[in-house]
Structure formats: structure tokens, C-alpha cells
Image (cartoon, rainbow, N blue to C red):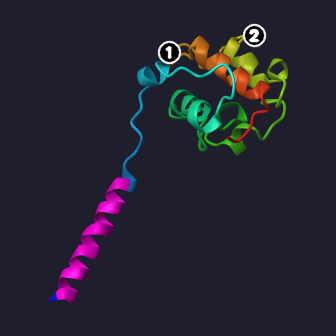
Amino acid sequence: MKKYISKILLAVTFVAALTISACKDTTTAEALDNIIIPATNVSFAKYIQPVFTIKCANAGCHDDQTTAGSLSLTTWANTTADYQVVAPGYPQNSKLVWRIEGTSGNIMPPIGYAPLTKNQIDGIKTWIKEGAKNN
């Protein structure tokens, strides 16, 4: 009987763990806009990737399938693969910055999509200036 109860408890624990791990982050663009990116020591994982995921990849433009402009922003490796797009240490030389600021002619994200806030743009620029680290 003890073996039977142990197996049931193990199965219940396994199912519970799967359920918890399957939960997805449900952060919205509006909630994301309320997160303040610090002026220094910008973490890619904590601040920049969520912006890219919610406002760029989940919009169906810069995900792994669509790669608009040959750019996927789903991971740090994808984001930093081209030194012309992200020039570590040099935000002023990064095509990504030109696009999000609109200095290249076309602003990203385009009209009709949730725009980046000034804080998000500044945070991306700071992250690049600090070396575009995978932190």
C-alpha cells in the first residue's frame, strides 16, 4: 500500500511540476511600459529581452519565423549576431538604434504597433553602450 501511495504522490508531483513550468509570462505591452529601465547596469535578460519579445517578436515581425529585415530579436545571440545592427559600445553606430529612434527614415516598430517608450529606447542605447552584454 505504501508503494502505491508513493507512486501516486510522485505522479501528482510530476503533473504539478509540468503545469507550473508550462505557465507562460503574461506581461502585456502596457505593463512593460511601466517598468523603469535603470540609467546604468542594464540587464539584457531583465529589461531588454522583454521589450524585444513583447514589442518586436510577439508582434510577428522579428521572431524566428518572420525575421523582418533579416532580424530576429528572440535571443541575445540573434540580436547581436550582426555588428552593424548592434555595435557593442557604440549605440550611435547601431542600425537598431537608428531604427528605434527613426533616424534612418523608418521608425520601428511601425505605426499601428505598440511604440517603444523613451525609457525603453534609452535603455536599449545604454545596454549597447555598456557592451551589449548577455547579462
> Percent position (x, y) of residue 54?
51, 31
Residue 63 picture quarter: top right
User: Can residue 73 be seen in the rendering of this structure?
Assistant: no
What stretch of residues is rendered in magenta? 2-20
Q: Viewed as shown, does residue 27 lie left or right of 79?
A: left
Q: Viewed as shown, does residue 74 lie left or right of 9?
A: right
Q: Quadrant of the N terminus?
A: bottom left
> Percent position (x, y) of residue 105?
74, 10
Q: Viewed as shown, does residue 20 lie left or right of 57?
A: left
User: From what the image shows, is residue 33 above or below residue 44?
Assistant: above
| Mark 1 or 2, closer to the camera | 2
Q: Quadrant of the C terminus?
A: top right
Element on which disc 2 rests: loop
At label 1, the amino acid type is: Gly
At label 2, the amino acid type is: Thr
User: Can residue 83 be seen in the rendering of this structure?
Assistant: yes
* Residue bearing the label numbered 1: 112
Residue 133 picture quarter: top right
